[in-house]
Amino acid sequence: MKLPSRSKAYMIPEYSLTGDLLSFLTCNLQYRYQNKGTLPPSKPVQRWFGEFIHGVMEEAFIQWKHNKTEFPWDWKEDIRPIEDLIDLRLQTRGLYPHDEDLFFSILNQPDNDLTIDDLNEHDHKKLASARAEKAINIWGKHLFPLIDSSELMIKGIRNMPQYDENRSRSNYYGINGVVDVLTSMKINKTLEQSNLDNYNNKIIEILKKDPQFQEKIKNTDEEDYEIIIDYKGMKRPPIEVNDPKSENKWESHKQQILTYSWLRSKQEDSKTIFAGIIFYLNELVPSKEDLMLIKDEMKNGLIDEETLEKYENDFNLIDKWQEDDKAPELSDDFKLGRSIRIINIDEDEIEKSLEKFDEVVYNIEESLIKEIKGCKIQDAWKAEADERTCTACDFKTFCKKNKNKPKEFKIP
Ligand code: SF4
């Protein structure tokens, strides 16, 4: 009797929207070293903060759902334990904050006898803590009552772009992501409650003023709809970029939300998705670096006239501000307005985003196949990024982009 041979292992490559799409677009070679290699970045601050603030908001929502603690939350009592928990979770994955960004995790120090009561104002004002507090007390208060599902895993499958049976690794690829979802039911319930309690929900207020969102509500027969939420641990990106080597983050974030909405629409219990909301949480407490970037954007004409006019005073303050000065006192309107972005969900735009995602997957697969066939890493992956990304990159000392650069010699 002839025994059947085991069939070849069938593997569908999986790509995530944040870990792969956005990361590959930032720099192909850095993505290869960070995501497909064995070298964890030493202190990827941007990545640490992004994951930290995401985790803090998710955990804060879970605690709010169970305890319904009234806002504003006390930093020491209510917020610091959440920071600690998320910090420890990230440490197990090799992600650590800079000392100036977050108080060290108390639970992780077996030899010291500090307790939460030893935390002081200085620790409270560390950047990550200050942002976590504002994010929870400013946006959490309005957002949490509207959330129907948090940390929803969304997955989908697509044909492998330019599939070639002799070359491609698989005829399909998977996309995944995690989102929070708001529903019209929760929005309507909060609206009723708002009328009773005379309280204005800022997110509902902003959606009411959004012409494209209102147009959708007007022109639909559907009673139920959904809104997809994402948090970004970064400042609001400029609408355009001058440097062709820089990724256009404004566009990539929109594509991310549109792809999420396609993925969500494939799930059985989903309703029509009317909009996406992105929170740029650095805007609530901008760092010096964020302020310098805003200054540059103003100088290079990357902020539109309407926005410049709307927040004229705040932009004037930033323009006059110098790096060694105390941070300017920016208005709450400015901080709130810049920290929220509504994305219109449109079928044609979704199609374009999916094509873009296919293109990125094709490029990643091409580089991977080159490497599998023996091409050197630095020849298989493109080393192209803006100056800021390269300056913070752990791989700059051996990156081919810097090979031909003259070495800087410092005179002692
Ligand atoms: S130094 Fe710049 S080009 Fe080279 S891997 Fe790092 S980010 Fe990419």
Image (spheres, rainbow, N blue to C red):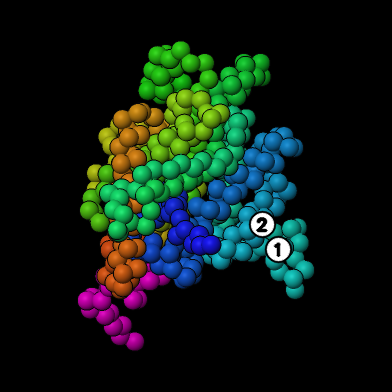
Q: Amino acid at mark 1?
A: Ile
Instruction: Give the residues in magenta.
Output: 392-412
Q: Quadrant of the C terminus?
A: bottom left
Query: Under tag 2, what secondary structure?
Result: helix
The type of residue carrying mark 2 is Asp
With 169 as the anchor, is 16 left or right in this view? right
Residue placed at 59% from the left, 38% from the top? 150
Q: Which mark is residue 20?
A: none
Q: Which residue is mark 1?
A: 106
Labels 2 & 1 near each other (Cβ < 8 A): yes
297 in the magenta segment: no
User: Does 181 appear above or below 245?
Assistant: above
Residue 319 visible, this angle: no
Q: Which residue is mark 2?
A: 84
Residue 27 horizontal/vertical position (percent) = 33, 60
Judge from the rendering whether residue 184 lies leftward or rightward of residue 29; answer left or right: right
